Image: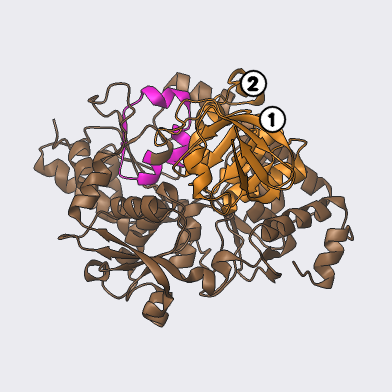
Chain colours: A brown, B orange
Amino acid sequence: MKLNEEQQAMLNGSRGEVMAKIMKTLVMYGDAFGAERMVPVTGKYGHTVISFGLGVMDPVYDLYDEILSAGILPEQKFTADPKPLDPRVPSTPLEDLVFKKLMYNRQDRYEAQLQKLGITKDEDYTCACYLDQVGNTPEKGEVLSWAESSAVVYANSVLGARCNRNSGIIEMMGSIAGCVPEFGLLTDEGRKADWIVEVRCRKKPESQLLGSAIGMKVMEDVPYIKGLDQWLGSELDDRAKAYLKDFGAATASNGAVGLYHVENLTPEAVELGESLIKDNAKVYIVDDAELERVYRNYPVIWKKPEAKPQLAFIGCPHLTLQQLTDWARAVLKGLEANGRKKVAVPTVFTAPVQVIREFEKTIYAWPLKKSGVIVSYICPLMYMNNPLCKSKAVITSSNKLRTYTSAKYCTDSEILDVITGGVK
Amino acid sequence: MKTFQGRVIVPGTISAEALVSHGGFNTLASFQMALQFGDLKAMGKDTEVQCGDQNNPDLYKKPMMGKALCLPQTIGSTTGGMVLFAACAHGKQPACMLFSKPIDSLAASGAILGDVWTDAVMPVVDNLGDEFLDYVQTGMTVSVKENGIVVVD
């Protein structure tokens, strides 16, 4: 890789041994992908996937201490993924003990590090950092040093920014050095589609199911999706963006997709059309039967597969204001139809702090609270990342949460039925 | 015995028993069970570092530590590299990682972070080809040479 004078000097130790190791890491990272140069990070803010102070991750916090002790700080401020704990989310005394004493016992240490490293605000912990209310919304073409698979795929696909699927730690190193190796999704060639996906469903497919099917098929390739605009339209309005947020998260967690194009909708597909498709692109046809096949193949790893659900999580990735309002309206309507005042299963909706604040101003906030639904900023994935949850029957409409935990996936309408007592 | 030529990502020589994943290796999901035990001491109890990814029938509940992990590529959360780095820092990493396809950005990050920032030795070779993954089976002995040659016995 060809480095400019300043980058070469950093690699040679002009800014100390720790900075030299950071540059060495970034250069090796670029070399693995044939990068020829470093390019400046032009996005205003970074985003880090690491938001948790987990005891087993001490090497990460030791590494950050090493960086801070060397007097090195990122060149940009950054947002972070959601926190793993929120007292509003129901937990047993035993779970509290496990969460606070055994698992997230480095949370204070790590949050203090993030303050020093430059988190934008103490409330900026969300995986959906790009939402208007949070404000870390990159412009088309900007180069980012982000990690968080759902945020990266959204920034690339819906916003047209340029970011590789960086790992935690690497993203912080890019923000520190102010540059990232140019390869993959940072290049025009790397943004071309390897797959044509033809959506031939008879009704609007569940975003999280469609994303799962495509992710499992194309793995880390770039798909160009045809036929989805018939349901999403050709404008990136709030509902289309929310659909694509959930769809993208499923492609990124069930596979390793970092960028997708939706014909007539996402910015590069609108601008460049089918010229984005590589000559030898493979074809994947998705119809209702294919989605049914994918859905039926999800393993259910509850101890008792037919157990009554004990907890429902909705909002992984975090909900938009529109989604939160839509869910509130649907739950209240469902409860009324089923003659209930309270939800049948403890239910948690998750969203960024800033979105929750806006939601609390709406007419739905108080009735939803009275119905027993908890609205939280927590990361459901982190909440469920403990051995006790194995024996807990948790349901979710998130395919990401299903992938990483013992939560059982339900479609939106299925989970709504369970929450509102429509399913006995 | 069969020999495959790959590309060296992290150099090193090692021989170990193969553990083969034909589907994408989800790093976070795979290390999830080991991570759930909380801290370094407790992770030590999970000495074999069992794979916790219920979606990976090839590896689920099989020990990963010290094995020659043979895989197409890694998938899933961008915490993947950080998780691999932590496994290396704790000395709980696979013996080596052998990719049939070009390495992905998360696996590369973890391997490089482990190489630059820890004392762990975990040779990584990619581009071994589909034939490698067709041939190698869990339990076979795999030897990695410094120049990216992988011998499956």
What chain is tagged by disc 2? B
Badge 1 marks a residue whose secondary structure is loop
Which of these two is toward me, B13 or B113? Answer: B13
Where is residue A117? Give x, y as percent.
Answer: 70, 52
Question: Which numbered marker is on residue B90?
Answer: 1
Residue at position x 28%, y 21% in the image? A304
Q: Which residues are magenta?
A: A379-402
Three-letter code, disc 1: His
Where is residue A293? Give x, y as percent.
Answer: 23, 45
Work out which quarter of the rendered image holds the N terminus of chain B and state it.
Answer: top right
> Can residue A356 be seen here?
yes
Q: Is residue A251 left or right of residue A185?
A: left
Residue at position x 18%, y 54% in the image? A288
What chain is tagged by disc 1? B
| Image vertical order of residue A18 relative to residue A77, above or below | above
Which quadrant of the view contains residue A275?
bottom left
Q: Which residue is mark 2?
A: B44
